[in-house]
Amino acid sequence: MLKRPTLWAAFCLAFCGASVAHAEMTASQSKNPRVAFSDAVRDVLGSDHDGLTSVTQRRMDRLRTEPARDVDVMRYDASFLRALPAVSGNETWRCLTEALYFEARGESVKGIFAVAEVILNRVESKNYPDSVCGVIYQGTGKKYQCQFTYACDGHKEVIREPQAWKKVGKIARLMLSGEAPADLTDGATHYHTKSVNPRWARVYPRTATIGYHHFYRQERRVASN
């Protein structure tokens, strides 16, 4: 049974992680849910309010939208995922689930987690949009000019494998909630299958090879077509 954390438990989780806030990328005030959240809890927290406002957007989004889970030990295998209950979620969850389904559902469990890491690493990078959906659909105005081919190949995307959808949906939830450690790719922002050799692969350092994909970390901005 999934359990939603108490208000004070959520606040404690956020406050305890506040010490690393300065190491993470934050969004503009116009997009930052902390502004609305700040008004809602100011009277409750009093002097602790300032400490909570230093929590990063990504961490606050998790506390705001994701239920707590009883995941004691993270394992990258199918039996671990099967034991978890089916999940659903908001627009952010659906965007990530769709990307994992169309980009990586044929990969190993570890490989799917690794692709999810790339997307979330881009969200935290100043070189890309600051939301999951923004990253996934960046550049979809022109055919084959987007970051993720399925989003701009001109074909209607249909979910034909419900079991694969359930699997990647659970992975998306674990990644968005922060329960997966996100340490498989050493901060990778790019990946490609072993069958291709894009130009940027000769510029960015390779950080990992998992399944059918090579992973790379963008050290500086260059063209990535």
Image (cartoon, rainbow, N blue to C red):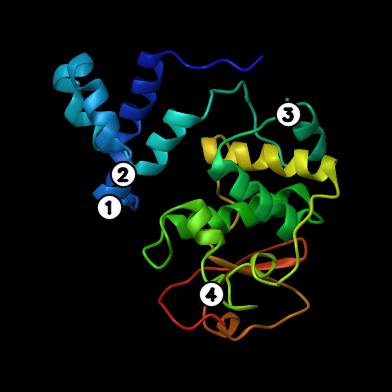
Residue drawn at point x = 48 percent, y = 30 percent: 65
Q: Which residue is mark 3?
A: 86
Q: Which residue is mark 4?
A: 205
Q: Are marks 2 and 4 in contact (CB under 8 Å)?
A: no
Amino acid type at image mark 2: Asn
Q: Are marks 4 and 3 in contact (CB under 8 Å)?
A: no
CA gap between label 1 and label 4 equals: 30 Å
Q: Is residue 54 left or right of residue 218?
A: left
Q: Which residue is mark 1?
A: 28
Residue drawn at point x = 82 percent, y = 56 percent: 106
Residue in front for this viewpoint, 48 or 146 = 146
> Which numbered mark, 4 or 3, is in the foreground of this view?
3
CA gap between label 2 and label 1 equals: 6 Å
14 above or below 171? above
Q: Are marks 2 and 1 in contact (CB under 8 Å)?
A: yes
Q: Which comes sooner in the sequence, label 2 or label 3?
A: 2
CA gap between label 4 and label 3 equals: 37 Å
Q: Which residue is mark 2?
A: 32
Amino acid type at image mark 1: Ser
Amino acid type at image mark 4: Pro
Residue in front for this viewpoint, 194 or 41 = 41
**How dense is the environment of label 2, judged by Cα within 10 Å: few (below 14), some, or many (20 and up)?**
some
The image position of residue 136, as x and y in percent, is: 56, 60
Residue in front for this viewpoint, 6 or 182 = 6
The image position of residue 124, as x and y in percent, is: 41, 55
- Viewport quadrant of the N terminus: top right
